[in-house]
Amino acid sequence: MALDGGKTGMAVRPDVLSKDKKTYNKRPPVWKETDEDRENINRWEENQPNAIRPPKLSKFIMDTIYDYGKKAGGLWKSQVEENFEKFVTSNRTKDEDLVGPWNNAVLRAEQLKRESSSLMDEHLNKIKLHVEAMFQEHSQDLASPKKSPSKKRAAQRSEQQEALRALSIRFAGFPLPESVPSFSSEEIATLRASYAYLYCVHKTGGFSDHRFPWNMAMRELCLIKTRALGRMKAVDGEFYDHFTMKHPKTHET
């Protein structure tokens, strides 16, 4: 029966409590410990060993499953990394479809500049400078997120997502259509996304493996690509909602 000090007025003697802590207050077995548990233990520099099954007993089934899973996971991980490396190595070229809208706009601007006006070129430059400024902010704010020993990994991810949303809003909010009348709102969004991708290609030496264009303009880049492929299908938002599977807990009762 558990000792309920609040009701009985009794308490465990300090020497008994100390002895019991030494005997029972230990890290869980390796198979039961999560990555977050280990991260917290390392953060607080605790050297306490994991609980070990008495040698007189046979090997525990969960230890067997853990060992097998670790071995199988290592094999799968090496295969995945090998396949990804092959893919990256064979595809280190920029996607011409994604850079197409920007390159085409630059050609039109150059032609207009030769014939009559440099206005379109000036408007493109506004988009260009905005994208490059946002790239710098993205790199500073998200490439090396600040870590705090007192915050759990989930809380840090949440803060990073909030920062990402704020950056996305600023990315999509400029330039305003009235400041670049050479382009419509839709054209500005397309050019902004296309140049974000192209700029990252140049910054990363020929291949855009930086998250910036995808974090800032994933939807527009997908639209550019699907238009280029020629099998684009437009779907209304309310109809699209029926394509997604919702968790039972999110259903209204």
Image (cartoon, rainbow, N blue to C red):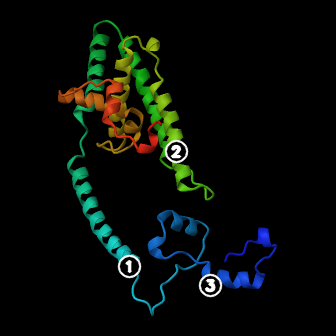
The location of residue 242, given as percent across then percent down, is 32, 32
Residue for badge 3? 23
Q: Earlier in the sequence, mark 1 or mark 2?
A: 1
Q: Secondary structure at mark 3?
A: helix
Q: Picture coordinates of residue 237 (x, y %)? A: 35, 26
User: What is the quadrant of the N terminus in the image?
Assistant: bottom right
Give how far across and how far down residue 104 sits, in percent.
26, 22
C-alpha distance separating marks 3 and 1: 23 Å
Q: Earlier in the sequence, mark 3 or mark 1?
A: 3
Give the percent coordinates (x, y) of residue 11. 78, 76
Residue drawn at x 36%, y 25% is: 238
- Location of mark 2 (residue): 160
Q: Is residue 210 above or below residue 121?
A: below
Determine whether, in the image, residue 202 is placed left or right of residue 168: left
Per the image, the residue denoted by label 1 is: 61
- SS for tag 1? helix
- Report whether 232 appears left or right of 198: left
Q: Quadrant of residue 213?
A: top left
Residue at 22% x, 27% y is 232
